[in-house]
């Protein structure tokens, strides 16, 4: 299937989460905008908007109809297949991943008990991040991650929404299929279900023939279970966020496994300002870093070495 057809499929799937009136409106957008769409944004009291590579704009035909709390509630009901109460535990983390790997980000009023954030109520904003595959996204990058033909442990860095997960997934697929690199067994700790988008034991996203996925469990536990049970040559995870993630990466690195991961940041200097990432840098867990930035509407990928704790 051609990339254009896949992009349309992801758009249609994500737009199906919207209330009917809004779904109909977004599906009348020009083909190019449907292909390039990155997010839908719903804010109570404001018209709905769409995020494209050149920024966020109002959706034509919706400017006179502001989003209501009911619209947000309907979207959540659709995303949870009519059982919003069953996803409350995930909602309290501020997001919900649904079939196909699409992510709903949520804002509202916090529910606090004994000084602990328990959940959200009175939802006021909702963002649907449209998952999509981009075949060829790793072209020109993967070859720079090799040393004598062998993949090196790599950290992918960028601000939110720049395509870290998309690039990670494509590198996983290429290595797993032996496309542009030595074919290796890859284990993926897919805590949020956004890398492989598993459904009924099958990945909705192309992650390669030699890839094993542990999804919907904490990254640390997923990495260690893959390490113990699946004999991976490469371990991959999305978004390092906590010290326990680093602990698991240190364990895997000590076992001779190649590591692939992503992190939020603008560059290595910014990353080094945060203690959890400083450990990764100083202990030389990764050998390469890919910095994703925007050059106009296009993404730019800069590969830099991470050697001996020096960035």
Image (tube, grey):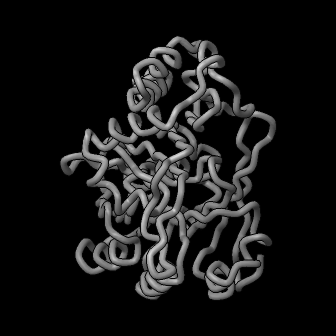
| In this picture, residue 98 sits left or right of residue 297 | left
The picture quadrant where one finds residue 278 is bottom right
Q: Residue furthest left?
A: 200
Could you say where residue 187 lies in the image, as x and y percent from the top left? Answer: 35, 65
Could you say where residue 111 lies in the image, as x and y percent from the top left? Answer: 47, 65
Count of marks, rendered view: 0
Q: Residue at x 32, y 62 (%)?
A: 216
Q: Residue at x 36, y 50 (%)?
A: 196
The quadrant in which the C terminus is found is: bottom right
Could you say where residue 257 lies in the image, as x and y percent from the top left? Answer: 43, 77
The quadrant in which the N terminus is found is: top left
Could you say where residue 140 lies in the image, as x and y percent from the top left? Answer: 64, 46
Residue 106 in view, yes or no: yes
Q: Residue at x 49, y 62 (%)?
A: 238
> Foreground residue, 302 or 249?
249
- Location of residue 53 with respect to 248 vertically, above or below: above
> Foreground residue, 42 or 287?
42
| In this picture, residue 94 sits left or right of residue 255 | right
- Location of residue 152 with respect to 71 vertically, above or below: below
The picture quadrant where one finds residue 70 is top left
Residue 177 in view, yes or no: no
- Location of residue 31 with respect to 135 vertically, above or below: above
> Foreground residue, 152 or 123?
123
Q: Residue at x 77, y 70 (%)?
A: 270
């Amino acid at each position: 299937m051609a990339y254009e057809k896949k992009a349309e499929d992801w758009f249609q799937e994500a737009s199906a989460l919207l209330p009917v009136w809004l779904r109909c409106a977004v599906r009348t957008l020009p083909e190019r905008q449907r292909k390039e769409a990155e997010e839908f944004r719903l804010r109570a009291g404001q018209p709905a908007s769409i995020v494209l590579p050149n920024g966020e704009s109002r959706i034509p035909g919706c400017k006179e109809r502001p989003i209501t709390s009911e619209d947000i509630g309907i979207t959540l009901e659709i995303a949870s297949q009519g059982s919003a109460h069953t996803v409350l535990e995930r909602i309290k983390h501020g997001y919900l991943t649904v079939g196909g790997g699409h992510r709903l980000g949520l804002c509202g009023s916090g529910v606090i008990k004994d000084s602990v954030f328990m959940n959200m109520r009175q939802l006021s904003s909702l963002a649907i991040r449209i998952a999509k595959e981009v075949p060829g996204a790793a072209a020109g990058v993967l070859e720079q991650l090799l040393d004598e033909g062998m993949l090196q442990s790599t950290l992918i860095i960028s601000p939110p929404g720049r395509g870290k997960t998309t690039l990670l997934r494509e590198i996983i697929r290429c290595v797993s299929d032996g496309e542009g690199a030595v074919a290796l067994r890859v284990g993926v700790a897919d805590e949020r279900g956004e890398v492989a988008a598993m459904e009924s034991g099958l990945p909705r996203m192309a992650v390669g023939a030699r890839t094993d996925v542990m999804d919907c469990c904490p990254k640390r536990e997923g990495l260690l279970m893959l390490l113990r049970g699946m004999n991976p040559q490469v371990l991959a995870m999305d978004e390092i966020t906590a010290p326990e993630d680093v602990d698991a990466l240190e364990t895997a690195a000590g076992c001779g496994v190649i590591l692939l991961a992503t992190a939020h940041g603008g560059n290595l200097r910014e990353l080094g300002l945060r203690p959890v990432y400083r450990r990764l840098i100083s202990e030389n867990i990764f050998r390469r870093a890919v910095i994703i930035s925007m050059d106009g509407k296009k993404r730019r990928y800069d590969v830099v070495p991470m050697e001996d704790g020096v960035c």
